[in-house]
Image (cartoon, grey):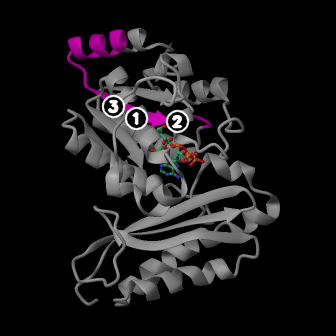
Amino acid sequence: MTTLTNVAAMHEWADAQHQRGATIALVPTMGALHSGHLALVNEAKRQADAVVTSIFVNPTQFAPDEDYDAYPRPLDTDREILAERDVDAVFAPTVEAMYPFGASTTEEPYVSVDVHTLNDHLCGAHRPGHFEGVVTVVTKLLNACKPDVAVFGQKDAQQLVILKHLAHSLLFDVEIVGVPTVREDDGLACSSRNAYLSDAERAEAPQVYAAIQAGEQAIASGEQHAEAVVRAMQKPLDQAEHARVQYASVVDASSLQPVTHLHPGDDVLIAVAVFFGDTRLIDNAFVHVPSSA
Ligand SMILES: Nc1ncnc2c1ncn2[C@@H]1O[C@H](COP(=O)(O)OP(=O)(O)OP(=O)(O)O)[C@@H](O)[C@H]1O
Ligand SMILES: CC(C)(CO)[C@@H](O)C(=O)[O-]
Ligand code: BAL
């Protein structure tokens, strides 16, 4: 497994793969790898001949009050994990390599991609600049790694939907593939940020998934009012003493705009963000409204 830290070396590797007729799958991550990331790597291996995993904690997607400095960076362990999985290359650029003119976009002339109304709800409404930072860095990663396929987790559902629109709107010649959320045995979605939880918070954290299951159940049993679905999602979270709900929402699965009524055949995204202390957890499900609803 080769490790590449600058864009020129990454281009050289990608060009060499394509010259030998191999396709490339990219798995973008911020490191601190867990089973969720490894599911993406497995899918990448199914999708292409050569797999590159990027490890980059992207400064521009963190709001000023968020955990950019504290975010875990166990690069050597991550590299060992990826080598064991026979990943072909790791792209671990410096901030300077990814942002040659500086990551603070207020200081330099710059170009960025606007996500417009896709940013209005869910995490976009609560993390100023987050998705602009994500689409900017993913654009850079796609240009640096030249993949045929890029693999992302459904755990970050709003991100996945926005990135599919990014590729479609801006004519990127890449397929965006989503992978279902990988969970701990008790249902909690695997996340690098789970490591921040105290024992008491960790014990209650599976209620976040219980909220999603309650929403799915309400829709499956014919509930037509989004408000009632949200109330059902709220109930398991009311039982978690340490939980503070940031949002519980039902939105259209493509436009990400709130829905009030569910109609048979609709595709919706039900999603929650919940704080346990300073740790913010998200979970969600894409749900197809059944014909009995
Ligand atoms: N439990 C999971 N199941 C499937 N994919 C996941 C899971 N957790 C993260 N991913 C995906 O892995 C990719 C990299 O995510 P990232 O490195 O931010 O990990 P993370 O654990 O989600 O971190 P964070 O705690 O910052 O949310 C993203 O596409 C993300 O959706
Ligand atoms: C896609 C991503 C690697 C971009 O920094 C990040 O948002 C993540 O880890 O989901
Ligand atoms: N997994 C999404 C990256 C973030 O929370 O910033």
Q: Secondary structure at mark 1?
A: helix
Of badges 2 and 3, nearer the viewer stands 2
Q: Secondary structure at mark 3?
A: strand
Tell me whether circle 3 and circle 1 mark residues in contact (CB < 8 Å).
no
Query: Does the segment drawn in magenta span residue 24?
Result: yes
- What number is the disc on residue 60? 2
> Is residue 253 or residue 214 the one in the foreground?
253
State the separation of the CA atoms marked 2 and 3: 24 Å
Residue 68 appears left or right of 172: right
State the separation of the CA atoms marked 3 and 1: 19 Å
Q: Earlier in the sequence, mark 3 or mark 1?
A: 3
The quarter of the picture where residue 287 lies is: bottom left
Tell me whether circle 2 and circle 1 mark residues in contact (CB < 8 Å).
yes
Q: Earlier in the sequence, mark 2 or mark 1?
A: 2
Q: Residues within 10 Å of mark 3 (few under 14, many from 20)?
A: many
Residue 84 in the image: above or below residue 189: above
The boundaries of the magenta stretch are 11-32
- Per the image, the residue denoted by label 1 is 136
- Per the image, the residue denoted by label 3 is 25
Residue 292 appears left or right of 282: left
> Is residue 58 or residue 18 the one in the foreground?
58
Q: Residue at x 50, y 36 (%)?
A: 29
Q: Amino acid at mark 2?
A: Thr
Q: Residue at x 43, y 78 (%)?
A: 216
Q: Amino acid at mark 1?
A: Thr
Q: Residue at x 25, y 83 (%)?
A: 263
Q: Give the number of marks.
A: 3
